[in-house]
Image (cartoon, helix red, strand yellow):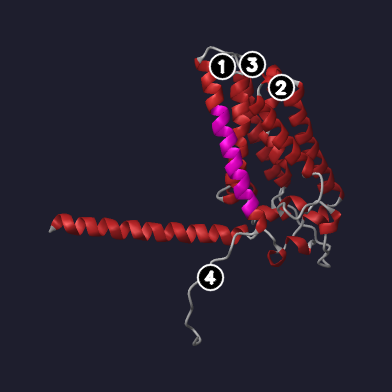
């Protein structure tokens, strides 16, 4: 091929990590749909949704088990997880030679936490006043679980508007996901609900302790593992392909609209 002439763009296959993200999006969406149908059916039949009857509800047991296993695995290194959460482990620290540790603005991190607590505080108040019941709070957790994957795969408001991080790999609060997901369960006392919340908070606390103890692991300046060249996720490539596809679909829609207008004016 001659110089200056660009060939067709090669479409990259989804990475193993991104494929797993899509799998999570699918099964979490299915869990949300099933739980919503179950909740609506119970309400229509006049039954009260009580989380203490957890064992007698197989769907709730499955939901608890899936997320408990997912959180437990997050405590250990894994090639199947995003570098965003794996950077906490010592084995993934590859020194660049620089000692200039640069982390995201702590003010932005605090603002993110306050915004999250504020809105969930409102939902908690609605639960305490009887407007929301335990079933709604559980559904809210499942909505958060789906939104978590949407943030990773498509668009994250925290990244875009507050934290301003380059990508998920460099995200300062990546391991906050489960704690944010199960925040509504604080207002639903019970062994099963609070066990999810306690493990999620343990993940968050461990993450924050490691950020304080080993900040060099979390900085792109000091950890080669976080550089684009070493990324195993390749989400940025995936997102660029989605943007390109969106542009192509827009152009196609505009052409179709022009054709329809031309036919109507004949």
Q: Is residue 38 above or below residue 167?
A: above
Q: Which residue corresponds to the image point at 60% horizontal and 29% vertical from the top-left? A: 140
Q: Earlier in the sequence, mark 1 or mark 4?
A: 4
Q: Which mark is residue 259?
A: none
Q: Give the residue number, with chain letter if any, for mark 2.
A: 55
Q: Position of residue 243 (x, y in %)?
A: 49, 58
- Label annotation for residue 128: 3
Q: Disc 4 designates what residue?
A: 10
Label 2: few (<14), some or many (≥20) within 10 Å?
few
Tell which residue pokes out farthest to the top in this image: 46
Which residues fall within the magenta stretch? Answer: 19-36
Distance, label 4 to label 2, CA atoms, is 50 Å
State the SS at label 1: loop
For mark 4, give the secondary structure.
loop
Q: Nearer the viewer, mark 1 or mark 4?
A: 4
Looking at the image, is mark 1 or mark 2 earlier in the sequence? 2
Quick check: 241 above or below 203? below
Residue 207 sits in which quadrant?
A: top right
In the orientation shown, which residue stands out farthest toward the bottom?
2
| Earlier residue among tags 3 and 2 | 2
The residue tagged 1 is: 131
Q: Residues within 10 Å of mark 3 (few under 14, many from 20)?
A: few
Could you tell me how far apart the alpha carbons at marks 1 and 4 are, in whole angstroms? 53 Å
């Amino acid at each position: 091929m001659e110089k200056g002439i660009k060939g067709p763009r090669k479409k990259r296959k989804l990475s193993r990590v991104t494929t797993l993200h899509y799998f999570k999006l699918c099964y979490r969406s299915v869990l949300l749909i099933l739980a919503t149908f179950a909740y609506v059916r119970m309400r229509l039949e006049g039954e009260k949704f009580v989380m203490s009857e957890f064992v007698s509800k197989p769907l709730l047991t499955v939901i608890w088990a899936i997320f408990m296993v997912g959180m437990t695995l997050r405590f250990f290194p894994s090639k199947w997880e995003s570098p965003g959460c794996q950077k906490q482990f010592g084995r993934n620290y590859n020194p660049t030679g620089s000692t200039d540790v640069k982390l995201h603005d702590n003010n932005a991190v605090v603002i993110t936490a306050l915004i999250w607590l504020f809105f969930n505080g409102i939902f908690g108040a609605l639960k305490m006043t009887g407007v929301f019941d335990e079933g709604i709070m559980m559904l809210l957790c499942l909505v958060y679980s789906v939104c978590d994957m949407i943030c990773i795969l498509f668009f994250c408001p925290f990244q875009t508007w507050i934290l301003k991080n380059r990508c998920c790999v460099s995200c300062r609060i990546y391991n906050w996901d489960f704690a944010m997901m199960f925040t509504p369960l604080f207002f639903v006392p019970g062994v099963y609900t609070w066990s999810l919340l306690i493990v999620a908070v343990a993940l968050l606390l461990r993450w924050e302790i490691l950020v304080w103890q080993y900040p060099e692991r979390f900085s792109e300046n000091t950890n080669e593992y976080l550089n684009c060249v070493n990324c195993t996720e390749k989400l940025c490539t995936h997102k660029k392909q989605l943007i390109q596809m969106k542009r192509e679909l827009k152009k196609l829609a505009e052409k179709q609209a022009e054709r329809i207008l031309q036919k109507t004016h004949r």
